[in-house]
């Protein structure tokens, strides 16, 4: 019996599961998928989520996006401190971690502060009182005294200075001038150079005419002389800059002006060292 050639098409064999898995792993779309997954694992948002999950459920994270690029700043509050992370546009990593130290103290601990007063550039009277409380006016240095008193007039035009001079009344060259004179028309407002208590308000029998004396404490006093009138009385408390009198030419005076004195423990000193 002769052999006949069997003609026909071979049936295609199904690929094995191993071949399918191998082929699937080589597909281009799977390669891009792996790249996306890797990027997700490295993304700033995913890192922040992982930090938040480690820190605890319900904790809050603040995320700030800068207009010039993705910049993340995250604060995760915990019982012991805070975690701060910063990330740039394509790369992100934690840049700083600060653990705040725990501060404890006994329940019966007490903290005491002792200070006479507090002064600042906005509270010149507080500064003056603090300086005078620390030591008497006599112990105040020139640097401390400078600018500690305010101006008794709005316009401080100096005329006759403190010290020896020729008397404008007698013409004697050896007269000691106990204060600083300032030009002021009669009726000009005279103000307290600092806060204090009025200890004298009346007529001065030794040439001062109408005179007001204010005690600022610890040996420091100021006097205002040749006044046309005054509006304060002995024992009255006055504040720095308060209106106390009007300038004049009473007493031993040749014209309207203010004679201003500064006394330390009863002795006159140059007022310019305190103004």
Image (tube, rainbow, N blue to C red):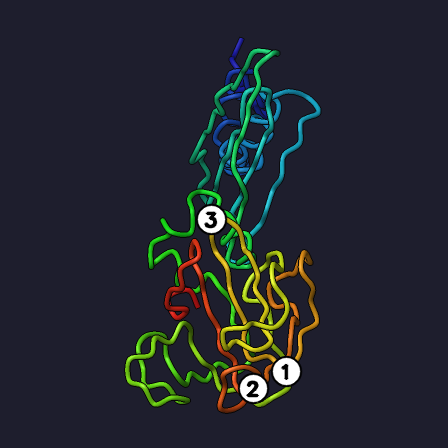
The quadrant in which the N terminus is found is top right
Report x, y in % for residue 181: 45, 80
Does the image show residue 250? yes
Which of the two residues, 26 or 7, is positioned nearer the viewer here?
26
The quadrant in which the C terminus is found is bottom left
Which of the two residues, 117 or 227, is positioned nearer the viewer here?
227
Q: Residues within 10 Å of mark 1 (few under 14, many from 20)?
A: many
Q: Residues within 10 Å of mark 2 (few under 14, many from 20)?
A: many
Report x, y in % for residue 36: 53, 37
Report x, y in % for residue 95: 42, 36
- The CA span between labels 1 and 2 is 7 Å
Looking at the rendered image, the disc whose residue lies closer to the viewer, 3 or 1, is 1
State the residue position of label 2: 249
State the residue position of label 3: 132
> Who comes first in sequence, dot 3 or dot 1?
3
- The CA span between labels 3 and 1 is 31 Å
State the residue position of label 1: 228
> Who comes first in sequence, dot 3 or dot 2?
3
Determine whether the residue tagged by mark 3 lies in a helix, strand or loop.
helix
Determine whether the residue tagged by mark 1 lies in a helix, strand or loop.
strand
Determine whether the residue tagged by mark 2 lies in a helix, strand or loop.
loop
Residue drawn at 44 percent across, 35 percent down? 93
Report x, y in % for residue 253: 50, 86
Residue drawn at 50 percent across, 52 percent down? 127
Whether pointer 3 and pointer 1 mark residues with C-beta atoms closer than 8 Å, the reply is no
- The CA span between labels 3 and 2 is 33 Å
Residue drawn at 30 percent across, 77 percent down? 164
């Amino acid at each position: 019996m002769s052999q006949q050639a069997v003609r026909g098409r071979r049936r295609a064999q199904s690929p094995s599961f191993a071949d399918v898995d191998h082929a699937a792993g080589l597909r281009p779309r799977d390669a891009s998928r792996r790249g996306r997954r890797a990027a997700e694992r490295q993304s700033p948002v995913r890192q922040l989520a992982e930090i938040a999950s480690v820190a605890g459920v319900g904790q809050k994270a603040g995320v700030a996006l800068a207009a010039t690029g993705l910049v993340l700043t995250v604060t995760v509050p915990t019982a012991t401190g805070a975690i701060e992370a910063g990330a740039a546009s394509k790369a992100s990593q934690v840049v700083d971690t600060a653990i705040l130290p725990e501060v404890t103290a006994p329940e019966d601990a007490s903290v005491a502060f002792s200070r006479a007063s507090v002064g600042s550039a906005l509270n010149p009277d507080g500064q003056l009182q603090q300086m005078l409380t620390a030591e008497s006016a006599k112990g105040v240095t020139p640097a401390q005294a400078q600018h500690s008193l305010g101006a008794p007039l709005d316009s401080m035009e100096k005329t006759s200075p403190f010290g020896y001079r020729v008397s404008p009344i007698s013409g004697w060259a050896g007269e000691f001038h106990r204060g600083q004179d300032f030009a002021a028309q009669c009726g000009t407002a005279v103000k307290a150079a600092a806060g204090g208590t009025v200890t004298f308000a009346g007529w001065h029998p030794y040439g001062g005419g109408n005179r007001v004396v204010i005690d600022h404490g610890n040996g420091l006093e100021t006097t205002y002389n040749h006044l046309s009138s005054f509006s304060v009385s002995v024992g009255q408390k006055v504040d720095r800059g308060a209106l106390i009198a009007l300038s004049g030419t009473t007493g031993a005076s040749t014209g309207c002006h203010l004679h201003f004195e500064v006394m330390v423990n009863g002795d006159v000193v140059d007022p310019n060292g305190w103004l």
